Image (cartoon, rainbow, N blue to C red):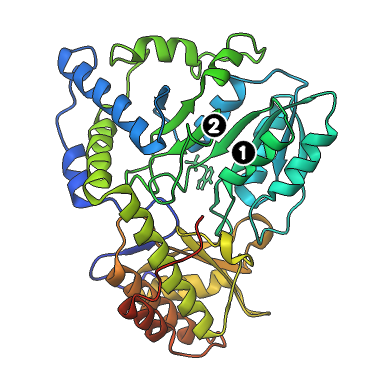
């Protein structure tokens, strides 16, 4: 691609990191301040409180200067002990990675197998918990939005499944690619640990991660046996109460976080969620018109954040992505793990509107032609028709 001159703004249409709005870039480009000053304390108190409104919690939210993987590890090391059993669902590549981290810490994982084309099944979780008379399962761990496939899991229904089984397991949910894009309620759904990250729905650069912590999870962290230091909730929550951090925080990303949360509330969280659903429906309409297949088979679980698209047999998704990037300056998501080469992903999250999506879909449609991938034209028209007619209202809730 060295002979190509990329003109105009790059279309970053991967499902995170998502494009960072100019407002947030400006907020970040401030002088670094003394992280022990009164000025920092006010910023710290603000973002620690304001973050709770995005998780819909009144309980502590801790913010780590790390990528999402750190917050995954933090959830495990603060609550579990070596030899504990947890229940997870194989929704895709990210559930598989979280599973592998648990295994590295000596946790026994019961992994409910999945075909990567749907979310975690509440009925299977309920059945497994009901069978567990000895209460060996210490936690149920689910990825809310499986970024590798474009399938969401029904967190409220999984909560009901845990309750129906009368099981005391902790409930831990990865919202790294859903927070700020898909309806989520930490307190109402009685989630014990919600894990998240900065670079998707929060529209920030990579580099911040989060744990929202229930009282039950915090109590578990007082007696569990896994060692930790950097990730330890106890120090973090104690020192956060004053607006400060036990170590040097990512000051400028916190300026960005303050701005991001303000932007989400200016639009209104419900409007943000509705926008994501509307754009996702338009994207799926395009895929259908091209004669291609959406990876997620359950309409009630199709992601508002991204759409995974199956390539026709014998056509390599990565070759198509490379050609599309070189010709049209657009980055699309690759197939990960089991679906590498077979799937590409279109991100429609964060700073994305009707015209951003239509531009991205134009790139995909022209890219399919350029790469010689069998398809029908008219995907962009189908998306426009849907957005124009408001036919994307009344999507199934996720
Ligand atoms: N979980 C999900 C659902 C993700 O989408 C990602 C990253 O894409 C991660 C976990 C890992 O986060 P990070 O790459 O920020 O460490």
Label 1 Cα crowd, 10 Å radius (few <14 / some 14-19 / many 20+): some
Secondary structure under the numbered disc 1 in the rendered image: helix
Q: Is mark 2 within 8 Å of ligand 1?
A: no
- Look at the image and tell me whether residue 350 can be seen: no
Residue drawn at (24%, 51%), measured in percent from left and top?
Answer: 267
Secondary structure under the numbered disc 2 in the rendered image: loop
Image coords of residue 159 (percent x, y): 61, 38
Left or right, 35 with reference to 340: left
Residue identifier under label 1: 159
Left or right, 135 with reference to 392: right
Q: Is mark 1 within 8 Å of ligand 1?
A: no
Could you say which disc has been placed on residue 47 in the image?
none
Q: Quarter of the image holding residue 48?
A: top left
Image coords of residue 397 (percent x, y): 50, 57
Say if mark 1 contacts mark 2, CB within 8 Å. yes
Residue drawn at (65%, 15%), measured in percent from left and top?
Answer: 226
Q: CA distance from mark 1 to mark 2?
A: 7 Å
Please give the count of numbered marks on the rendered protein: 2
- Look at the image and tell me whether residue 4 can be seen: yes
User: 178 or 359: which is nearer to us?
Assistant: 178
Q: Quarter of the image holding residue 382?
A: bottom left
Image coords of residue 100 (percent x, y): 69, 37
Of the numbered discs 1 and 2, the one sitting upstream in the chain is 1
Residue identifier under label 2: 190
Residue drawn at (17%, 39%), measured in percent from left and top?
Answer: 27
User: 3 or 371: which is nearer to us?
Assistant: 371
Label 2 Cα crowd, 10 Å radius (few <14 / some 14-19 / many 20+): some
Residue drawn at (23%, 12%), measured in percent from left and top?
Answer: 36
User: 287 or 281: which is nearer to us?
Assistant: 281
């Amino acid at each position: 691609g060295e002979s190509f001159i990329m003109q105009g703004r790059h279309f970053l249409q991967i499902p995170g990191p998502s494009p960072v709005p100019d407002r947030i870039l400006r907020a970040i480009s401030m002088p670094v301040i003394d992280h022990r000053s009164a000025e920092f304390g006010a910023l710290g108190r603000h973002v620690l409180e304001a973050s709770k409104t995005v998780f819909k919690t009144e309980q502590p939210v801790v913010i780590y200067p790390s990528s999402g993987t750190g917050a995954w590890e933090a959830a495990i090391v603060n609550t579990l002990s070596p030899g504990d059993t947890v229940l997870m669902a194989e929704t895709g590549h990210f559930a598989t990675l979280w599973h592998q981290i648990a295994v590295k810490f000596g946790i026994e994982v019961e992994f409910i197998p999945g075909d990567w084309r749907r979310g975690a099944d509440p009925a299977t979780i309920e059945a497994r918990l009901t069978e567990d008379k000895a209460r060996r399962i210490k936690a149920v761990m689910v990825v809310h939005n499986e970024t590798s496939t474009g399938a969401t899991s029904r967190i409220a229904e999984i909560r009901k499944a845990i309750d129906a089984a009368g099981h005391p397991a902790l409930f831990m949910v990865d919202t790294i690619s859903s927070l700020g894009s898909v309806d989520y309620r930490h307190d109402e759904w009685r989630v014990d640990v919600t894990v998240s990250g900065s670079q998707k729905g929060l529209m920030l650069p990579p580099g911040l991660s989060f744990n929202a912590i229930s009282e039950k999870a915090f109590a578990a962290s007082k007696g569990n046996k896994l060692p930790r230091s950097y990730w330890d909730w106890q120090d973090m929550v104690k020192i956060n109460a004053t607006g400060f951090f036990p170590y040097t925080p990512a000051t400028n990303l916190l300026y960005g976080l303050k701005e991001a949360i303000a932007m989400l509330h200016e639009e209104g969280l419900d409007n943000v969620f509705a926008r994501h659903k509307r754009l996702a429906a338009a994207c799926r309409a395009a895929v259908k018109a091209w004669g291609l297949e959406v990876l997620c088979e359950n309409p009630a679980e199709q992601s508002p954040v991204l759409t995974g698209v199956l390539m026709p047999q014998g056509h390599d998704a990565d070759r198509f992505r490379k050609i599309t990037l070189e010709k049209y300056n657009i980055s699309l998501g690759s197939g990960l793990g089991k679906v590498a080469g077979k799937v590409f992903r279109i991100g429609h999250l964060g700073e994305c509107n009707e015209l951003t999506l239509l531009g991205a879909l134009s790139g995909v449609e022209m890219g399919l032609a350029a790469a010689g991938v069998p398809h029908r034209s008219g995907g962009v028209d189908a998306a426009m028709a849907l957005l124009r007619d408001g036919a994307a209202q009344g999507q199934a809730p996720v």
